[in-house]
Amino acid sequence: MYKKRVSYYNSYTRSAYISINKRLLYVFCGASLVGVSLQLLLVKNSVIDGGIVGLSIILSHITSIEIGLFLLLLNTPFFILGYSYLGKRFLILSLFAITVLSFVTHFFEPFSSLTSNPLIVIVIGGITLGLGVGCVIRFGGSLDGTEVLAILISKRTPFSIGEVVMFFNLFIFGSSIFIFGLKEAIFSLATFFIAYKTIDFIIK
């Protein structure tokens, strides 16, 4: 899964006929969909995603500071760090995606969750989250700085990108048990699974 993402991050020939303006439009739509999924389905039901998004949700819950601020602050250094390896276009599209995501999560912060039904939250939340993230990746950006860090770490250690990301996510989901509870952590893992199956589908 993560090898597919790296190939998308590095390939400058993918969808070559698409202009940067259209890329920005698709990235905007994808990031907006992620923001809607987070604020109207997941966050207010204590369901988290992996990576920086999940960490931002946890920190937002602990500090009562809006999730959008953490998304922007935590992701930006990783994307700048990965600039030399992944290129200028990746940096621009990723920073744009994170900015849009931060704005959308801020905008929908006052709104209540659309539902508290766990099945709907897991399935619909996971699918919409995956569609949004997959769209951003498909057109050259990223919403998760941990993947960038994992790419860089994998180049200097015997660990694969997937192993590094999984280590981060085990820490994040493990921490969520103590903050939100075991049931919510299980719901989060189920949502994570559906989201990343959807991302794989979009990339393929």
Image (cartoon, helix red, strand yellow):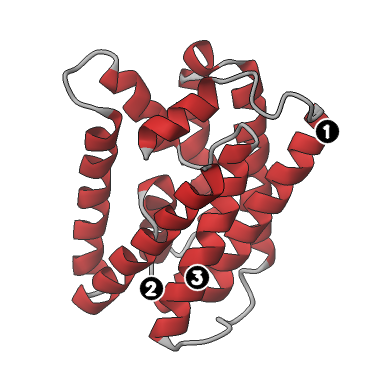
Residue at 38% in and 70% down = 47
Give the side of residue 91 with respect to residue 148, left or right. Answer: right
Give the side of residue 118 with respect to residue 154, left or right. Answer: right
State which mark lies toward you, 1 or 2: 1
Give the side of residue 143 with respect to residue 117, left or right. Answer: right
The label on residue 46 is 2
In the depicted structure, whether residue 80 falls above or below residue 45: above
The label on residue 125 is 3
Visible residue check, residue 66: no
In the depicted structure, whether residue 106 falls above or below residue 47: above
Quarter of the figure that contains the N terminus: top left
Picture mark count: 3
Question: Along the polypeptide, which appears first: circle 3 or circle 1?
Answer: 1
Question: Marks 3/1: CA distance?
Answer: 28 Å
Count neighbours of disc 1 (C-alpha within 10 A) and say few if under 14, some if 14 to 19, many if 20 or more.
few
x, y percentage for residue 31?
A: 64, 50
Q: Which one is nearer the viewer's eye here, 24 or 18?
A: 18
Q: Amino acid at mark 2?
A: Ser
Visible residue check, residue 128: yes
* SS state under label 2: loop
x, y percentage for residue 138?
A: 60, 39
* SS state under label 3: helix
The label on residue 21 is 1
Give the side of residue 171 with respect to residue 203, left or right. Answer: left
Q: Amino acid at mark 1?
A: Asn
Q: Which one is nearer the viewer's eye here, 77 or 15?
A: 15
